[in-house]
Amino acid sequence: MALCTECGTEVEPGSKRGRRCADCHAEYMREWHYRRNAEVRDLLIAEKARRRCEWEGGCQFNVTRPIHLGFDHLPGHEKRFELGKAQMLGKTVEEVQTELAKCQVLCHNHHAEMTALRGKLSVALRAEIEMQVRNEETEHA
Ligand SMILES: [Zn+2]
Ligand SMILES: [Zn+2]
């Protein structure tokens, strides 16, 4: 007969949980998730503190507080998930590191500017494509 190593309750032999009863195993998993989550949080904060705002040409806002910095996925990289939601999504440190490599850190001001800029660029691109299509249509007319 096997006993739970945590509380001494009887455990069915050959249990996949090892030597823990269901309750102690659940508690163990909760703690494990919590620890892993804390690691991800620390990693994200450390990365923001290290990189600061990476706006091209330098950031004039001198933002240092991690809460005022965000991660921006660089164009041409597949976005697997939002880094700001990494903890909520239960992402591992490895998954977060992979995602971090595809991102730049921007302060909120520059993040807003970048979003506006990309929006404008895509509008310009759409206009250009429409123009091309129209030109082709007149050529073939
Ligand atoms: Zn137990
Ligand atoms: Zn900035």
Image: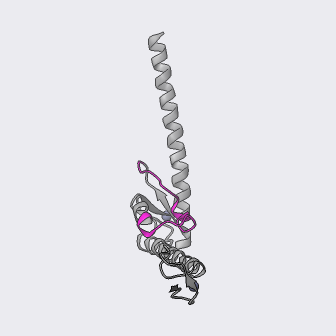
Which one is in front, 95 or 101?
95
x then y, percent, for residue 42: 48, 76
- Residue at point 46%, 25% (across, down): 132
Q: Is residue 120 above or below residue 84?
A: above
Q: Quadrant of residue 51?
A: bottom left
Q: Is residue 71 above or below residue 123?
A: below
Q: Residue furthest right?
A: 23
x then y, percent, for residue 65: 53, 75
Q: Is residue 91 magenta?
A: yes
Q: Is residue 59 visible?
A: yes
Indicate how the structure is coloured in the image: one colour
Q: Residue furthest top?
A: 141
- Residue at point 51%, 34% (across, down): 126
x then y, percent, for residue 54: 43, 63
Q: Is residue 55 visible?
A: no
Q: Is residue 108 above or below residue 74?
A: below
Which one is in front, 139 or 8?
8
- Residue at point 48%, 14% (across, down): 138
Q: Is residue 122 above or below residue 38?
A: above
x then y, percent, for residue 113: 54, 55
What secondary structure predominates along the stretch shown in magenta? loop
Which one is in front, 60 or 69?
69
Q: What is the magenta range? A: 76-95
Left or right of 69 in this view: 97: left
